[in-house]
Image: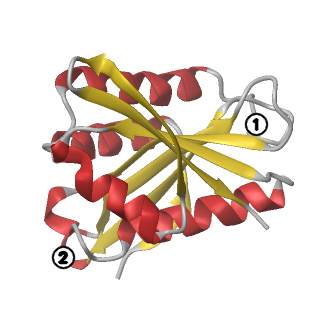
Amino acid sequence: MFKIRNFRGESDRNKIAELLENVPSFTRDEKEVAMELVDVTINNPNIPTSKENDGYKFLLATLEIDNLKSEVVVGYICYGATAMTSGTYDLFWIATHSDYLNKGIARSLIVHMLEEIKSYDGRLVRVETSGQELYKGVRDFYLKLDFIEEARIKDFYKIGDDLVIYTYRIL
């Protein structure tokens, strides 16, 4: 069974990089940007994430491998406060290892993220994704978790690839 824990800095960097290599839907550029956020966080360890701060916060889903006496990161989420807003947060990245899809990992990461944001007096979460058919499962996932499609910008990423923006209001 997997568990959710906080990011531990440098010791988690390679684990997240390995996870991203096992997410076939992410492009090379997307993986590089995701790792840039990890590196920014590692290089600025004194920046806590709070309701007043726009630092990045990571939660990791891990699975202990008994025979190896170690853990594997099977999912992660990266979010942070949205600059120049009050109580609004962005969900920047969420990923699940391809071998562990449909096991509740992404859902658990979202639930933990929402609990943390609520503890910061957060009120709104925004997430952006692609309108391509490849991302239909992602869009359906957000809808199942009661996110609402707030906007769609046609041909945003490229011709035929819309930007779809979802929000979740924390009660």
Between 54 and 149, the one nearer to me in the picture: 149
Q: Residue at x 74, y 39 (%)?
A: 49
Q: Mark 1 or mark 2: which comes first in sequence?
A: 1
Query: To which residue does mark 2 refer?
Result: 67
Residue 108: numbered disc: none
| x and y, in percent, of residue 81 in the image | 72, 36
Between 29 and 87, the one nearer to me in the picture: 87
* Quarter where residue 69 is shown: bottom left
Query: To which residue does mark 1 refer?
Result: 48
* Cα separation between marks 1 and 2: 35 Å
In the rendered image, the vertical position of residue 70 relative to residue 134, given as above or below: below
In the rendered image, the vertical position of residue 101 relative to residue 44, given as above or below: below
Q: Amino acid at mark 2?
A: Asn
Q: Residue at x 36, y 75 (%)?
A: 104
The C terminus, quarter of image: bottom right
Local SS, label 1: loop
